[in-house]
Image (cartoon, rainbow, N blue to C red):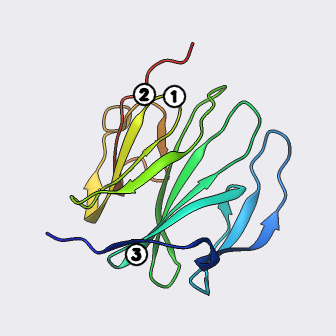
Amino acid sequence: MVVDMELLSKDKLEIRDVEKGSEYISNKILLAIEGRPANSFVKGAQVEYGVKYDNCYVIFVTDDILNEETLRVYLFDLNAKLIDYLYIGSAYSTGCLQDLTLQKDGSISFSFIGDTLWNIKVLSKAKMIIPFVSNPKGVTRKSVFSGFLHVQGSPKAET
């Protein structure tokens, strides 16, 4: 199955409003994707990347919290309605989102937290998830029992 993917330019991703957090609590932002305002605020501070993926958008947002950088991956439909999300990170972990690449198999690969290579693929229907077993270490989801975002990665312990 061929997946139509396009990396969105920064001008197609806009922060329309911000609910301020604190030094330890993430901001909440209201996004507009290709001019369409999202239906709800999401956690995060900095929009890093956006990918138009067939009939949806995958948006990568970081928290910008000192010594605890977290990557949030949001899945929106074409009307900017939030469908699913997950976040990657843990207490006292630091990371920098790098090398985001659209793969021929329809996955999105990137580096975050150390040398970990992550892959995310959008599923056409929600997949059952078994808590504490189905997710790689450091991944937390909106819904613990099902999700449209399939994520793979093998993070190493930070020293």
Q: Quadrant of residue 134?
A: top left
**Residue 13 image point, x, y percent:** 61, 74
Q: CA distance from mark 3 to mark 2?
A: 27 Å
Q: Name the residue located 75 percent from the left edge and 40 percent from the top edge.
A: 65
Q: Is residue 138 above or below residue 62?
A: above
**Residue 5 image point, x, y percent:** 34, 71
Looking at the rendered structure, the secondary structure element under dot 2 is loop
Q: Which mark is residue 155?
A: 2
Query: Badges 1 and 2: C-beta atoms under 8 Å apart?
Result: yes
Tag 3 residue = 56
Mark 1 Cα shell of 10 Å, populated few (<14), some (14-19), many (≥20):
some
> Of label 1 and label 2, which has the lower sequence position?
1
Residue 39 in view, yes or no: no
Query: Badges 3 and 2: C-beta atoms under 8 Å apart?
Result: no
Q: Quadrant of the C terminus?
A: top right
Which mark's residue is nearer the viewer, 3 or 1? 1
- Taking 64 as reference, is 132 left or right? left
Looking at the rendered structure, the secondary structure element under dot 1 is loop
Q: Name the residue located 26 percent from the left edge and 55 percent from the top edge.
A: 127
> Of label 3 and label 1, which has the lower sequence position?
3
Mark 2 Cα shell of 10 Å, populated few (<14), some (14-19), many (≥20):
some
Looking at the rendered structure, the secondary structure element under dot 3 is strand
Q: Name the residue located 59 percent from the left edge and 79 percent from the top edge.
A: 12
Q: Which mark is residue 114?
A: 1
